[in-house]
Image (cartoon, rainbow, N blue to C red):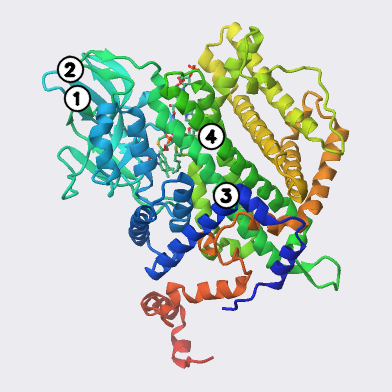
Amino acid sequence: MSTAVNPDLLQERNRATFDPSQLTYFLYDGAEKTKRKRYIQNLAIQELSRMGMKQYATLSREEQYKQALQKHAYYVQTQQRLGLTDPHEKEHLFQAVLPCEASPLTLHKSAFVNTFAMLASEEQKRKWLPLMKEFRMVGTYVQTEMGHGSFLRGLETTATYDPRTQEFVLHCPTISSIKFWPGGLGKTSNSCVVMAQLISNGQKLGMHSFLVQIRDLDTHQPLSGVTVGDIGNKFGYHGNDNGFLKLDNVRIPRENMLMRHSQILPDGTYVKPKNDRLMYGGMTSLRAGIVGVVSQRISMAVTIAVRYSAVRRQSEIQPGGGEVQVLDFQTQQFRLFPQIAVAYATTIASRSISDYYQRVSAQIEKGDLQELPMLHALSAGLKAYCGWICMDGVEVCRLACGGHGYSQASGLPKIYVDTTPACTYEGENFVLMLQTARYLIKCCRKVAEGEALPEVMNFLKVNPGEKSRLDAQLFMPQLIQAYRHRAGRIAQEVSQKLQAAISKGVNAGQAWNSNSVQLINAGKAFSQLYLVQDFAQTVQSFGGKLREVMEALWRLFAVSGILNALGDFMLDGYISSQQAAMLQQRLLDLLSELRPNAVALVDAFDFPDAVLDSALGRWDGQVYEALYDYSLRSKLNEKQVLDAYHKYQRPFMESQWKQNKAAALTSRL
Ligand SMILES: CCCCCCCCCCCCCCCCCC(=O)SCCNC(=O)CCNC(=O)[C@H](O)C(C)(C)COP(=O)(O)OP(=O)(O)OC[C@H]1O[C@@H](n2cnc3c(N)ncnc32)[C@H](O)[C@@H]1OP(=O)(O)O
Ligand SMILES: Cc1cc2nc3c(=O)[nH]c(=O)nc-3n(C[C@H](O)[C@H](O)[C@H](O)COP(=O)(O)OP(=O)(O)OC[C@H]3O[C@@H](n4cnc5c(N)ncnc54)[C@H](O)[C@@H]3O)c2cc1C
């Protein structure tokens, strides 16, 4: 394959008005850390290549599972060999080893060990954490059942305390109570944290967590009373053995209930937690983490689509003027440039929600639960909102690559099937957004009662007759104010509707359901406001040319967000039709303004080719060579004439030939 860089891409890089390495250093916390990231990723990529790893998309499901295990083992061992302790460095390594390739061991650390560490007492941690950390116990987080996932209070699996033996009896009483979906459960895990309804002294005490061993630690055979297996093929996520688990009166010692926040004493007496929802802590942490996962996916997809659009030439703009780079079509820019903005906006939001999570967790550790409701509302809203826009964005990128986007060679299908479950797992997005709305409505009531709100919620104090002062300059404060006004208005309006329905005697649940479409909209508007504000704040920390480019990108994010939900902004007359028309024009101006920097903006993400795993998104732009090479490696090309020809095609063809003509046929027409 040619080693030269495609001249169109070369030219794109030369015409950028800013230095993309400045942006790369922002993303990876400076030049030194960027160098270290590159060192770690290149080392892993070279070693894995020497180990003969195959392209994920070319493997069968079973092979994907096996290779993912092999790679995950390499990931952990390489971490140890290099002495990595910084979580970002571990993340860089993980990205290079398993880029969008679901691993059966992902849940071990992120959900099993982390949830255990959050919910177990000090004594329990001393006993079990070492075994988990050295992979003697390999585990997962087992909550969802066949019949219930979203409605946790509806889970049916029971953990009944038996004071005579000081044991819990874990039992799945019905088909719908069979645990279903947990990652790594089917074939890989020997242990798990199981969520079950606690029953003691005949009292139902709600969902609690239990450490349950499901397989023998040596033979790996399922233990007595345990039926466990893989759930079968899915939309994607093939490297992961998402599993089912049926517990049939399985007994575990009393000390296996995770007892940090609530306890069962030997005689069966129940000690309540300070707050029931502390039990949900593991989910909150993962939701915060998922914002980072989806932001990475859209960043990869848009890198592929923008680079490809710079080398793909098709059609003429001026008759006779020659074929142009498809990136020069306004429609292509209209599809792709907002996705670059989404990639940066969500990356920035992922950092701030992660920092916020760490801060509030530290407070919770000290017993201060004041910010828990806000953390829940924000992590749920951002997980859902970022999940949606990143999933949609990945598909926009795939479609923008035309026919080749449909090939696995583009890397885009692999990214899509890895992004879309983020809208379902760790809380179905609509269900989560309604949790965010629940918090908003509570805050609206506080406004009505004149109570103080956290500073970030002050947008709920809406000025009803307010008109936007937005003009063609698109000043930051006016754009942000538009988002504040819209988020506040929608939340207040739906809050008033709820109040009105309840005062007419409609019960609270009915009133909630009848307004839930608007409640979702309130949650989205709040989450989008958060992204717009957070992105703006970051842009203001940049200087020089980088600031100019990133301000334009931020404006594109803010303006396209308004135009995509124009009704929300115009319904109460806040934005006039003249302002809306001005925004439509300014959006097009911003596309032209950003055009010279499109490639530099995606190059700044600094994804190695092996991470993108894409014939279309290669750094050197040699896409046709790569596509052709990929085709030649198709398993169907291993033989010139396939067995299926002799077995099915030829007999079928012959069955269609008219008897007398068949005799006259020669091998060439
Ligand atoms: C940064 C760390 C990074 C870590 C690493 C990151 C790496 C990422 C790797 C990604 C890989 C991902 C792999 C995939 C993992 C999938 C795992 C799963 O799906 S596992 C399965 C995931 N499954 C799901 O996610 C299930 C989704 N369902 C649920 O979570 C619950 O059923 C519910 C929240 C919807 C309702 O619960 P219900 O008990 O009926 O509650 P009500 O509605 O009656 O409200 C009562 C009160 O509770 C409050 N509150 C609620 N939650 C929380 C919270 N977390 N907190 C605080 N508070 C909370 C609520 O605000 C309300 O307060 P108030 O207004 O009364 O004051
Ligand atoms: C790839 C993948 C990995 C997973 N990994 C794990 C894991 O490791 N451990 C684990 O325990 N689980 C896991 N899950 C399960 C996952 O957490 C659940 O599927 C998820 O929480 C959604 O629940 P559900 O399937 O019951 O959806 P449902 O709740 O049945 O959703 C169906 C529809 O009903 C709607 N709906 C439900 N309730 C409401 C409501 N109150 N208001 C409005 N609409 C509502 C939803 O919005 C959705 O449109 C995984 C799932 C997937 C796809």
To which residue does mark 3 refer?
28
Q: Nearer the viewer, residue 468 or 94?
A: 94
Q: Could you tell me if residue 297 is visible in this image?
A: yes
Tell me the tag on residue 355.
4
The kind of secondary structure element at disc 4 is helix
Question: What residue type is disc 2 on?
Answer: Pro
The kind of secondary structure element at disc 2 is loop
Q: Could you tell me if residue 431 is visible in this image?
A: no
Q: Is residue 88 above or below residue 369?
A: below
The kind of secondary structure element at disc 1 is helix
Label 3: how many Cα within 10 Å (few below 14, some 14–19, many 20+):
some
The mark nearer the N terminus, 4 or 3, is: 3
The mark nearer the N terminus, 2 or 1, is: 1
Q: Nearer the viewer, residue 652 or 31?
A: 31
x then y, percent, for residue 177 = 30, 32
- Disc 3 or disc 2, which is closer to the eye? 3
**Which quarter of the figure has residue 625?**
bottom right
Describe residue 374's horizontal placement relative to residue 186 as left or right.
Answer: right
Q: Is residue 478 above or below residue 652?
A: above
Q: CA distance from mark 4 to mark 3?
A: 15 Å
To which residue does mark 2 refer?
266
Tell me the tag on residue 269.
none
- For this orientation, the residue located farthest to the front is 32
The kind of secondary structure element at disc 3 is loop
To which residue does mark 1 refer?
254
Q: Is mark 3 within 8 Å of ligand 1?
A: no
Label 2: how many Cα within 10 Å (few below 14, some 14–19, many 20+):
some
**Which quarter of the figure has residue 504?**
top right
x then y, percent, for residue 475 = 82, 35
Quick check: marks 2 and 1 in contact, CB under 8 Å?
A: yes
Question: What residue type is disc 4 on?
Answer: Asp
Quick check: marks 3 and 2 in contact, CB under 8 Å?
A: no
